[in-house]
Amino acid sequence: MFFLAAEGGESTHNPIIPIWQEIVVGSVAFAVLCFVLMKFVFPRMEQTFQARVDAIEGGIKRAEAAQAEANQLLEQYRAQLAEARTDAARIRDDARADAEGIRQDVLAKAREESDRIIAAGKEQLAAERATIVRELRTEVGTIAVDLASKIVGESLADEARRKGTVDRFLSGLESTGAR
Amino acid sequence: MFGQANVLAQGEAAFPPSVDDFYLPSILPWGAHDSYWFTKITAMVWIAVGILIIFFLVTYRKPQLVPTKKQWLAESIYGFVRNNIAVDMIGHAGVRFAPYFTTLFCFVLLTNFFAILPFFQISPNSHIAFPAFLALISYVLFNYIGIRKHGFAKYFKNSLIPPAPWYILPLLIPIELFSTFLVRPFSLAVRLFANMFAGHMLLLVFTLGGFAMLSANAWLAPVSVLSWVMTIALTFLEFLVICLQAYVFTVLSASYVQGALADEH
């Protein structure tokens, strides 16, 4: 109003009264702006924000899942390891037991073998001794009868054989020798 | 785009500046004083709309999860209005109004900014037509939102009848009616308009004042320089006002919507 007065009232404009053409132009321009931005830009921004949130939360979830899987695998490996250890221990025990058994077996066999060999030796020895004794006995008898015949001057061989003198004598010797 | 430069070039630096300095001759038809369809003011509105559309479409053509610099800038503007105005004022329900408030904020901010942009140097918002229809949209918006949320009767009951003792109500109801339904659109429009009008007028006074003093007496040259220095300082002040008024307009619109959505008074 001051300016209107200053200009001597020749001003045709009142700044408080809107110019309707400007309202129309402004409304149309602003409507275009609203349409484009609210339809094509800001909804996509919301989508991007949401996608970002999802990506971050999804990343955390994926990490958690991976962690859980890793933990599970670790547990599994631990269990397998423990199982393998007990298996190994069992196998070792078995092997030890087997070895012991085999040793015992071999020992028993060896002992048996040696016993058999010793027994065979003894038997052979006894047989040879018996043979030798028998031969000695005949020989000693023959020699004794021969000697006796030379002393007596006649053959005593038949006599001696008939009466078994020599044998009896030797048995007597044996029994006294054994005593 | 001709503004003061034109006035100065013609050597008719009329001092003091008048309201007529806000009403430049139209561009099409050239030089007409009674045609308002295509003036510097409407051209600036279209330019503002064009700049905003191009800026947002270009920066948000291919949005990525990890934003580029430009995309980050566009998102920051939207995020600022969304989180610091819409969600802060209205709460979680404010997100769905964020696109409108961001559009409003950007439009007001850019058209305000033309006030200090070289070669533009006047804001369309110094013509009351533009703040007026923006305020009218806000007015229709908050009333529509309130009626849709509560129903016609309950909305007006909520808005008009504050929780006060009955004997004070005859006093309060007219006040509420006046402040909520009559004054709001005007205060919204006039606040923005008057700020931009006064800002432009201030810059005109100090710029033209410098020339006026210089032509009146050469000895006044130092004062002219002081006057122009003041213009620069006031331009910074104007920048503050520009941002503040864009923010205030948006915040108040959001606050009205919040009030309409609120269950209690």
Image (cartoon, rainbow, N blue to C red):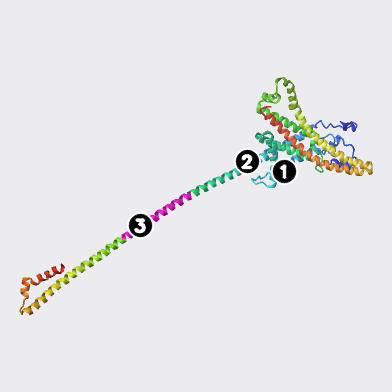
Residue A160 horizontal/vertical position (percent): 7, 73
Q: Which residue is drawn at 81% across and 40% down?
A: B237
Q: What stretch is highlighted in magenta?
A: A76-105
**Where in the figure is residue A137, as x and y percent of width and height?**
13, 72
| SS at badge 3 | helix
Q: What element carries label 2?
A: helix
Mark 3 is on which residue type? Answer: Asp
Q: Residue A98 carries which label?
A: 3
State the residue position of label 1: B55
Mark in front: 1 vs 3: 3
Q: Would you identify the image quadrant in which residue A112 lies?
A: bottom left
Q: Which chain carries label 1?
A: B
Q: How crowded is mark 1: few (under 14 residues within 10 Å), some or many (20 or more)?
A: some
Spatial CA span between label 2 and label 1: 22 Å
Disc 2 versus disc 3: nearer the observer: 3
**Which residue is depicted at the point 7% across and 72% down?**
A161
Vertical comparison of B40 with A74: above or below: above
Q: Is residue B115 among the parts visible in the rendering? A: no
A99 magenta-colored: yes
Residue for point 21% across, 69% down: A125
- What secondary structure characterizes most of the magenta part? helix
Return the x and y of residue A3 as percentages of the image width and height. Answer: 88, 33
Residue type of the residue flagged with mark 2: Gln
Q: Mark 2 or mark 3: which comes first in sequence?
A: 2
Check contact, mark 2 vs mark 1: CB within 8 A. Answer: no
Disc 2 and disc 3 on one polypeptide chain: yes
- Which quadrant of the figure contains the N terminus of chain A? top right
Instruction: Output the chain of dot 2.
Output: A
Disc 1 + disc 3, Cβ < 8 Å: no
Q: Can you identify the residue that label 2 sits on?
A: A50
